[in-house]
Image (cartoon, rainbow, N blue to C red):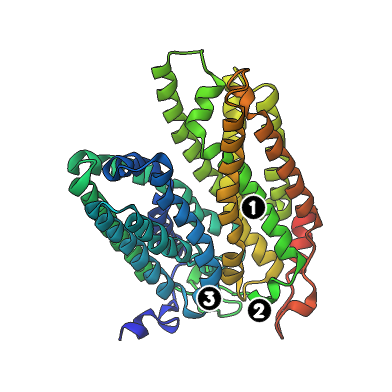
Amino acid sequence: MTASILSRERSIAPPGWSRWLVPPAALAIHLSIGQAYAWSVLKTPVQNSLHTTAVGSALPFQVAILVLGLSAAFGGTTVERRGPRWSMVVAALFWGAGFLVAALGIVAGQLWLVVLGYGVIGGIGLGIGYIAPVSTLIKWFPDRPGLATGLAIMGFGGGALVASPLSTALLAGFGKTGGGLAMVFVVLGLIYLVWMLLGAALVRLPRGVQGAAAEAGEVAVPQGGVPAAAALRTPQFWLLWVVLCFNVTAGIGVLERAAPLYQDFFAGSSPATVLAAAGAAFVSVLSLANMLGRFLWSTASDVIGRKNMYRVYLGVGAVMYLLLLLIGPGNKAVFLIATLLILSFYGAGFATLPAYLKDLFGVYQVGAIHGRLLTAWSVAGVLGPLIVDGVVDANSGTGGTLASHYTVAFVIMIALLVVAFVCNELVRPVARRHFVDGAESPAAAVEEGASR
């Protein structure tokens, strides 16, 4: 019975189903797994409760992001085959179970159990949950894929805006150590489990009736495309892998060190307590830019084309880093504009990517291709903090202003964005030989997007 309820066939929308019910289902998933961006709220309580170091308390988050990319890569084909409802239920079970195992680790005083729960088990839920709604949304919105994926992936960027106050309230109610902290993990896990299951119940696949009116709930679904295995043999896949990796590296370099970055750039301008409060507020503003960028810029890509949109992300992003170097220290207006744009491009790069893949490879296995490409996120999640933190630490005893300690790191980020810009310019339509029989090449869409 369960298998039939979760089967792909049982997920097909009945006549008259509105496609606008699908984005809320996707948002239910992404807002839940977006809690990962609010790990910093739990980080210090975990560190104090388990008597570990700052590095140790960061491990659950780092492992979760690493496993996200790996599970998305290895699970992408299964997600396509089994359908969105099965995938979303699996994601909900793993994500919820990850919190429960982490709670057990808190009670037992074992960091490795927290890493296993939140990082490994929860990370699998993150990866499957991240890609599960994407290909479904693209099928429902072939006319506006950027808007559709932006709606869902915006939720991942904005998940911290919900999770942060929720976690703070739970910590205040249950306590920040021992059994109280464990209860926080239990309650969060159960809330996200229920919320994600509701999204899974609501999601539907389009009927795929060619030529039917989208308003009636039956959209014309483009058929065919490049199989995931064949996509890995194309230069386009690897060019986009570099584009995503370096764009994420540039964004996460600011995001990971946001509060200290603000305090270092404006050291001495205000008392330490005021700077600390301003740094915390800066983190919230960056989260908002990350979220809004995923929707606004991705939607704009439907108008100006995906390739042109990435030209903006990478080219303007490099200019913003240059402004941070030359004018940013001491100039709050330039600093805020530059960092907000960098973070909006960071989020938008994720949201625009599925539509870019659809333009290049078609819809046939776009979810599986997307999953494999997310391994670039895993690499960038290590590379970005390593560059910024490593360079800053290496320069900490060399004198000069605190802002000057970032010079080499920002020069590296500019170089990476320039390399990614060149890779984006090299992207061309995928050769027809890679498409499955009967599939139509979407080359025209790519050329049209590049020329706008």
Residue at which label 2 appears: 224
Q: CA distance from mark 1 to mark 2?
A: 27 Å
Upstream in the sequence, badge 2 or badge 3? 3
Please name the residue shown 27% across and 60% down the image: 100
Residue at which label 1 appears: 245
Q: Position of residue 123 (x, y in %)?
A: 43, 60
**Which amino acid, by three-letter code, is at mark 2?**
Gly
Comparing labels 2 and 3, the label whose residue is closer to the camera = 3
Q: CA distance from mark 2 to mark 3?
A: 13 Å
Frontmost residue, 341 versus 395: 395
Task: From the viewer's perspective, tell me whether residue 366 is left or right of residue 272.
Answer: right
Asked where in the image residue 412 lies, by quadrant, the reply is top right
Dot 1 falls on a residue whose secondary structure is helix
Frontmost residue, 392 versus 239: 392
Rendered image: mark on residue 80:
3
**Which amino acid, by three-letter code, is at mark 3?**
Glu
Note whether 91 is above or below 271 in the view shown. Answer: below
Comparing labels 1 and 2, the label whose residue is closer to the camera = 1
Note whether 58 is above or below 275 in the view shown. Answer: below
Please name the residue shown 50% across and 45% down the image: 291
Q: Is residue 134 visible?
A: no
Task: From the viewer's perspective, tell me whether residue 151 is left or right of residue 305.
Answer: left
Q: Position of residue 244 (x, y in %)?
A: 65, 53
Q: Position of residue 39 (x, y in %)?
A: 39, 46
